[in-house]
Amino acid sequence: MHAIRDTNQLIAVGARLRAAREAIGCRQKAICFALNIGITTWNNWENGKRLPDPLVMARFQAKFRVSLDWIYAGDPSMLPYALAEKVLALVDKRMSHDVVIK
């Protein structure tokens, strides 16, 4: 049985991933190099076209301290405090531009 992925959920995951990347101050190219993935793959994730690979996200979490709870569920409680502040500020800014995060 395959889970049905809601487009809005994919977009929300992508928006949280982008907010996390911007909060840690990295360009897509640097993240891709650090995680050993293609830039098209990352771009598809940030744009809500594909769900991020959990194994790659585990490496992302280990290298950049971005919790999987944030990426997949929108729960910032496991993010380091300074990172959570930045991520939530970016999310608030985007929500004012009609981007749905949750």
Image (cartoon, rainbow, N blue to C red):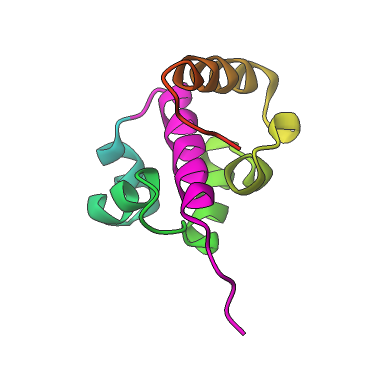
Q: Nearer the viewer, residue 18 or 83?
A: 18
Q: Where does the image place residue 89, in percent across and percent down from the top left? A: 55, 14
Query: 48 or 54: nearer the eye?
Result: 48
**Residue at image coords 41%, 19%:** 97
51 over 96 or under it: above or below = below
Give 1 or 31, whichever is nearer the viewer. 1
Q: Is residue 19 magenta?
A: yes
The N terminus sits in image quarter: bottom right
Question: How many numbered badges does the structure rendering display?
Answer: 0
User: Measured along the vertical axis of the image, is residue 71 above or below residue 3?
Assistant: above
- Where is 23 relative to 61, above or below? above
**Residue sitting at x 49%, y 19%:** 90
Give how far across and how far down residue 61 sits, in percent: 57, 45
Single out the residue that lies furthest toward the bottom.
1
Q: Position of residue 44 (x, y in %)?
A: 32, 52
- Residue at 58% from the left image edge and 37% from the top image edge: 66
What's the magenta bit mostly, secondary-structure-wise? helix
Counting from the top left corner in percent of width and height, residue 59 is at: 52, 52
Which quadrant holds the C terminus?
A: top right
Magenta residue check for 38:
no
**Horizontal relation, residue 17 to residue 88: left or right:** left
User: Which quarter of the picture shows residue 29?
Assistant: top left
- Of residue 102 and residue 23, the one placed in the foreground of this image is 102
**What range of the chain is rendered magenta?**
1-26
